[in-house]
Amino acid sequence: MPPSLELVTGVKADLRASSGHIGQEEVGVIGYVGNGMPVNGVIKQRFTDFLVNEVGMDGHVIHLKDITKPKEPKPDPPAKPAEPAPSMHEAAAEYKEPEPLPEGLQFETKTGWNDHTTRKLLPHFEKETIVALRALWEEGKEPPRKPDAGWGSRPDDREVVSHVVASKEERAGCHTAIREAFGGLFESGTKAEGEESRVVITYARAGGSRQTWGPQKPNHSKNLPPYIHFTLQKTNRETQDALAYLSRQIGCQSKDLGIAGTKDKRAVTVQRVSLRRGNKTMETIWKAVNGLTGGSGATAASVLSERAERGARVGDFSYEPEGLELGLLRGNQFKITLRNVQGESDEAIDATLASLRDNGFINFYGMQRFGTSSVPTHITGLSILRSNWSEAVDSILSLRQNEHPDCVRGRLAWLEDRDIDAALAAMPRRCVAERSIWEFWKRVGGTTDYLGALGTIPRNLRTMYVHAYQSYIWNLITSERIKLSSTKPLPGDIVLVKDDSTTAADADANANGDASRSRPALETASNATVKYLTDADVDQYTIFDVVHPLPGFDVEYPKGPIGELYATMLKADGLDLAHMRRDQREYSLPGSYRPIINRPQSLTWSQVRYTDPNLALVQSDEDAILGLNPPALNDPEGMFRAVVLEMTLGPAAYATMALREVTREETSSWWQTSLTVKGEDQGWRDGADGNAEAGAEGEGDGEEAEVTVAEEEGAGNEEEEANANAAGDEVK
């Protein structure tokens, strides 16, 4: 752990006590706002215990409403031709026989590839490339070795590489030719080799197959808006993982999909998604996502009566003129079930929740920001900020406890044998940072260029490390400030002089939350005006106005002991608060401001009695449409107690940090898993006839009552999210 942790807390972190997992105190999450009695319970025992619905820019909460096939708008009647169309005889007279194809390109005509296909390619590709592509087409698309690119799956690595294509315009022509000639069957990307670039063609991860080609309906969609928006409900999936799955089903690039904010993994979340559609229609997308193309065996009847495949259900389609971008949301509405609530009376529980409603919670960065492994992301971030490139790379490649066996094999192949080929063969494709480093070293033929290796990691992933260190500092500083007062501002505190567009949103350009990981309004602090509070004006503000900066070169710091603590902590970690710029631009942090206290909007709650832990206490949008899993009624004689609370949080807030204020418990996934295992309601389930297995609601229903620590490791954390994002955009 960073030296600053022991400096401030006086405790030297020892991860052995938590089986190699980091806990809240190791990332500066210490202290509470109120002094109410703890409401001890288990968070996220089931996926449906954590429902998240995006709040759009118009303030409306987004729900999945319509999962039926969308109705396409009727095409406009064709305009009358300005001149009479030529007669058949005139057209025949004007027709010219096309030039014969060059020798070696006169392929046998088959469904999906005829002479017209070859002529589409000929202006853009050399003969050898077209011949190689025809051979690949003849081989056909290999079936996936594991469905949905699960752990251990390997991609189809067959590819055709073109000649050197010098200009961007020429490469764009190549990509267009592939798309127009084959639709979604193939995908193309660009491979840069020094100063030269080539076009690489592979089978699309979820393209059609040769056998699915046939007569197409007339395309009336070209006059429709360029984007399609739809609602996505996902269950127990990272947002970028779900988008990558959708892109494979649809046959598009991940970059064609847009969202307003990423959502938590271990939850059921609902949000809008946009697609830059090209020539696709709402109907074709609905069919593709629901598996009605490509021979999956799905039927229209099953789509409307069974839960969606892979935990990704879509609906509510519309054509729109613009796509979605990160930050285009007001926040998220949460419906959270806290199970197996222990101890206090109903009145004491109500009092604790009323304190959360009135006094709020410390606006900490949650555990997802740092991962949950023995090598948290802020450790790597600190090494990067200290320009210790070898230490940063070593931290990324080091062993982690409770990791998937494929990852362990990959790491050991490198750490013990220095065998890059074996490491790459074992390491799953989703481990983007590790693979980027090894692939770079393999390409350059050496393993000593650490800075160059870091530079090959996708930017969003490598900057995540340094943002994690900023967040750690912010957490620890705020913990110390709350010790002074959690209810009122103090002289020396800073507030933002803000207009209507710069309210209490976190200005961190990479701020993430449980269900609201999105870009807020302020990218940096350069357009924020800071005011220092004094004895004369401190009474004009509330604790909700006070902000703390994330350290950087473009922020102001509080006065007094809290401001001094920033400099002291960074000095202990080998950094200088006055020198936060770096030669590498992406590691030069401007800093930003974040409110130290967050107050939920529209917080309500109810207490529910239950006996069977397998019964759902709330219902997802999809289940409500399908008539599945109606929530159990309150049983006054129930053996166990749950609390169901609803609240709305703005962007960049962590719902688990609000729950922490209520439960006074560790919110890390490994700890919550242990609480589930020990829970009295789980003991009842194990002893009840017919209820001894987790997920007794029905096989394949998408629900679980429990996961192991190994399964939960990294679930919902931002390192996995960034990896999924990078992997989804990677071009083989």
Image (cartoon, rainbow, N blue to C red):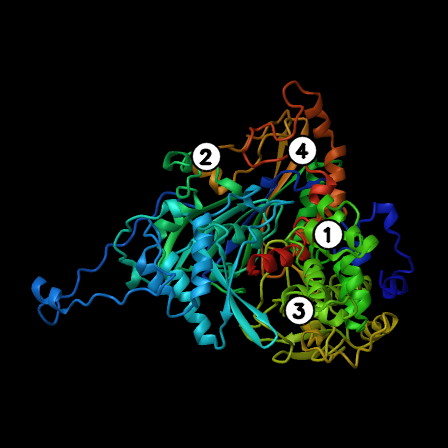
Is residue 448 at all visible to an observer of this figure?
yes
Residue 422 marker: 1
> From the image, which quarter does the N terminus lie in?
bottom right
> On screen, 309 above or below 9?
above
> On screen, 306 above or below 84?
above
Q: CA distance from mark 3 to mark 4?
A: 36 Å
Sequence order check, earlier mark of 1 and 4 = 1
> Badge 2 is on which residue?
306
> On screen, 23 above or below 730?
above
Which quadrant would residue 476 be assigned to in this image? Answer: bottom right
Which quadrant would residue 268 be assigned to in this image? Answer: top right
> On screen, 163 above or below 420?
below
Sequence order check, earlier mark of 3 and 2 = 2
Instruction: State the residue in front, 567 or 283.
Output: 283
Disc 4 marks which amino acid?
Arg
Disc 1 marks which amino acid?
Ala
Is residue 355 at all visible to an observer of this figure?
no
Residue 196: % across, % down = 56, 75
> Badge 4 is on which residue?
641
Tell me, yes or no, whether the two marked residues, 1 and 3, touch with CB atoms within 8 Å: no
Q: CA distance from mark 4 to mark 2?
A: 31 Å
Residue 24: % across, % down = 78, 53
Residue 545 marker: 3
Sequence order check, earlier mark of 3 and 4 = 3
Tell me, yes or no, whether the two marked residues, 4 and 2, touch with CB atoms within 8 Å: no
Instruction: State the residue in front, 184 or 340.
Output: 184
Sequence order check, earlier mark of 4 and 2 = 2
